[in-house]
């Protein structure tokens, strides 16, 4: 596996101002205005949060789901560097870029969401830290991971700027960064699930389990691969490039292996705890449970065979379904199966949705700028 | 090809965290119990007349604004606890509402405020130690100077107690702290101080529990003595008013008040002290004539969720042993597999 035969990364080139970046810019401007308004007038002025639903769209979607979508870098880097599957190397940089943008913006969303943001330094202050708190572990770990990812991605900028000496020095200990970049997401992606353990019986038994860290870790890895499938298809069509089916096909197979493991743990858990019967009750929770399960089972029918996996459209659909399945697990546990007492309902307000869209638009904009100007995507033959 | 072997090694390293969690002997963290000098309240719904004096006193003592839910906006009319309402008396109604404390065709009251759990979820949840449990009197205290407003405590509490002031850009968490800011001047919880019938009683939880059990053992309809305000331990009552100052010492700094014990009729209780065992015990205890679940008190197990959550956290991260071990394995594998793409951009 010594010689890397794949194409080296190169800037895509082309104009930075186009319809996509223009729309992204508009959404970002709208978001900026809403965020400013929120900082002046408080959370209630722009959100539908309430005493019964203290966490809403920004936490569950921007942070929980956003960071899981941003696990592509972790999932692919693990494949390449830990499982020594060098052939997937061309996927590393684009996945890593999407990941570091996703995580950085998840961090930004947290600052917009937390009420007393000026006190946030307490999170890193030893005399305030509470190591018993799952949230503490998540916050510190995500902060460290964002830093690690920027270092892991730094060679892209160093190449562009021609700083070969620094790049060489960085390369010497890059394996430590890679190892950290694999460990840290394992820690906080599992802990994001552990967050709901302390909620106890407020979370429906179909979701409240001590195995939730394993469920979250496995789905984060799955969503990481699913996002790579999704992004590869989108990037290829947007940049009119050929799709790397020769890579995506075997990667999708590995992904299905993880999905099978997840389904075994998920079903085994609800059966072993004797709560599977609750899923057959005619209730919103029962329906959501099976909808969530269907998203993980359907990909076996769509891309179960070798020939099916050679069809980019099928890979794309399977990717979307798995992203949806992982998202549903998170939305179900934190919002739908979370019983906060009678009289409370939650659906995000328009400004909340616009901020989430703005965060996504920021990711797209920066992704376009960096891939067009910096060596990220593999050079077209 | 050695790639298959490398793959397996990688698989071992990567799943180390999960497998390790199952294989290492894990010391489960037990549910904490109340500190010996735990302070709290005893709310006896059969004594409550629904006057809501405690709600008004609470607002005043904590400097909270009124909340309006009627058109004329004349009275403080909160519908639930909130960032500005730390205590509320709620009403249970059924059918014709003829009989007080009857489940069918009756009505009953229930106080909603912080239970001051022996092992609080909010304290376990708070990432920055803004919510802490006083090690001596067990009061669950809030410190706005540390709070980051993440609202994990709001999500975590099984009683739905800590609430965040979402409408204020400088909002904070609001919840009952047993009027701890008044203690240094010898005043106890305002709700207990003003309660005309002693339905809300302040005292050491141990004494309150004994008092609750005494009431449960009495025959409904018989006459007994009910204390009001602060429940004094027997020794303090005995030494009260003695010239040698012994009474003073046993009062533990609380202001001297005339004994306000009165005679009343024993209610028809559900034979259960709510809070004795729930979630490992709470410092606020409750007695009721109507099943607790019907008056809004959740049915909780005798162990805390904080114990489960912290057991998971500490078996994974205790002493950072597992993360360091996994990092070691990952570094070892990565060192063999990371081949820096030195040449990229120069040759293919």
Image (cartoon, rainbow, N blue to C red):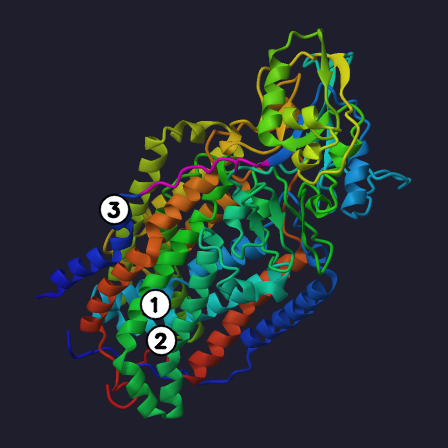
Q: Mark 3 lies on which chain?
A: B
Verify CB contact (< 8 Å) between mark 1 and mark 2: yes
- The magenta segment: B27-38
Above-or-below relation of B177 to B11 = above
The residue sitting at the front extreme is: B244
Left or right, A59 with respect to A9, comes to right
Which residue is label 1 attached to?
A181
Q: Is mark 1 on a helix, strand or loop?
A: helix
- x then y, percent, for residue B268: 67, 11
Which residue is label 3 attached to?
B24
- Asked if the stretch drawn in magenta spans residue B31, the answer is yes
Q: Is residue A245 visible?
A: no
Asked if labels 3 and 2 share a chain, the reply is no
Q: Which residue is nearer to you in this view: A286 or B200?
A: B200
Q: Which chain carries label 1?
A: A
Which residue is label 2 attached to?
A152
Residue pictured at 25% horizontal, 50% vertical: B20
């Amino acid at each position: 596996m010594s010689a890397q035969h794949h194409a080296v990364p190169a800037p895509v080139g082309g104009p930075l101002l186009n319809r996509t970046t223009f729309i992204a810019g508009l959404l970002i401007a709208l978001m900026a205005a809403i965020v400013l308004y929120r900082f002046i007038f408080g959370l209630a002025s722009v959100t539908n949060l309430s005493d019964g639903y203290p966490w809403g769209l920004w936490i569950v979607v921007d942070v929980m789901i956003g960071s899981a979508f941003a696990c592509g870098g972790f999932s692919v880097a693990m494949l390449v560097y830990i499982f020594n599957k060098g052939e997937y190397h061309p996927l590393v940089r684009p996945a890593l870029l999407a990941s570091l943008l996703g995580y950085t913006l998840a961090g930004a969303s947290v600052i917009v969401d937390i009420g007393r943001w000026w006190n946030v330094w307490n999170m890193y202050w030893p005399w305030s830290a509470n190591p018993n708190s799952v949230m503490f572990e998540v916050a510190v770990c995500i902060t460290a991971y964002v830093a690690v990812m920027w270092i892991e991605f730094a060679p892209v900028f160093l190449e562009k700027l021609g700083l070969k000496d620094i790049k060489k020095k960085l390369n010497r200990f890059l394996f430590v960064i890679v190892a950290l970049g694999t460990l840290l997401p394992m820690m906080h992606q599992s802990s994001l699930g552990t967050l709901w353990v302390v909620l106890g019986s407020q979370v429906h038994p179909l979701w409240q389990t001590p195995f939730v860290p394993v469920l979250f870790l496995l789905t984060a890895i799955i969503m990481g691969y699913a996002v790579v499938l999704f992004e590869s298809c989108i990037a290829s069509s947007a940049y009119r490039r050929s799709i790397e089916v020769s890579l995506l096909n075997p990667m999708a197979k590995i992904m299905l292996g993880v999905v099978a493991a997840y389904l075994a743990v998920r079903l085994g858990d609800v059966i072993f705890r004797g709560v599977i019967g609750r899923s057959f009750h005619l209730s919103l929770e029962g329906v959501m449970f099976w909808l969530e399960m269907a998203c993980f089972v359907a990909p076996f029918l769509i891309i179960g065979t070798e020939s099916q996996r050679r069809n980019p459209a099928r890979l794309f659909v399977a990717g979307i379904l798995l992203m949806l399945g992982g998202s549903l697990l998170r939305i179900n546990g934190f919002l739908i199966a979370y019983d906060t007492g009678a009289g409370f309902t939650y659906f995000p307000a328009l400004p909340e949705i616009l901020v989430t869209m703005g965060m996504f638009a920021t990711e797209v904009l920066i992704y376009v700028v960096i891939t067009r100007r910096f060596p990220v995507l593999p050079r077209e033959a | 090809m050695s790639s298959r072997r490398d793959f397996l090694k990688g698989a071992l390293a990567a799943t180390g965290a999960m497998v390790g969690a199952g294989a290492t002997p894990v010391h489960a963290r037990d549910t904490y119990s109340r500190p010996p000098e735990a302070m709290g309240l005893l709310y006896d719904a059969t004594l409550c007349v629904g006057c809501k004096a405690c709600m008004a006193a609470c607002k005043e003592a904590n400097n909270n604004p009124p909340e309006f839910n009627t058109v004329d906006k004349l009275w403080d009319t909160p519908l639930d606890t909130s960032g500005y309402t730390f205590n509320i008396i709620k009403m249970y109604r059924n059918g014709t509402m003829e009989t007080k404390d009857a489940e069918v065709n009756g009505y009953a009251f229930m106080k909603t405020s912080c239970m001051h759990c022996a092992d609080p979820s909010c304290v376990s949840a708070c990432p920055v130690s803004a919510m802490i449990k006083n090690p001596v009197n067990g009061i669950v205290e809030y410190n706005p100077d540390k709070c980051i407003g993440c609202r994990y405590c709001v999500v975590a509490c099984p009683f739905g107690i800590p609430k965040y002031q979402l409408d204020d850009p400088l909002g904070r968490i609001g919840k009952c702290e047993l009027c701890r800011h008044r203690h240094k001047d010898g005043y106890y919880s305002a709700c207990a101080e003003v309660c005309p019938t002693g339905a809300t009683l302040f005292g050491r939880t141990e004494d309150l529990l004994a008092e609750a059990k005494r009431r449960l053992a009495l025959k409904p309809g018989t006459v007994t003595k009910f204390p009001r305000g602060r429940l004094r331990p027997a020794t303090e009552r005995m030494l009260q008013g003695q010239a040698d100052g012994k009474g003073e010492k046993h009062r533990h700094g609380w202001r001297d008040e005339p004994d306000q014990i009165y005679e009343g009729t024993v209610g028809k209780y559900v034979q259960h002290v709510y809070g004795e065992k729930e979630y490992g015990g709470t410092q606020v205890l409750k007695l009721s004539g109507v099943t607790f679940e019907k008056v809004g008190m959740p049915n909780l197990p005798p162990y805390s969720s904080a114990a489960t959550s912290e057991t998971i956290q500490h078996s994974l991260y205790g002493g950072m042993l597992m993360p360091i071990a996994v990092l070691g394995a990952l570094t070892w594998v990565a060192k063999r597999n990371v081949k820096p793409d030195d040449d990229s951009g120069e040759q293919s």
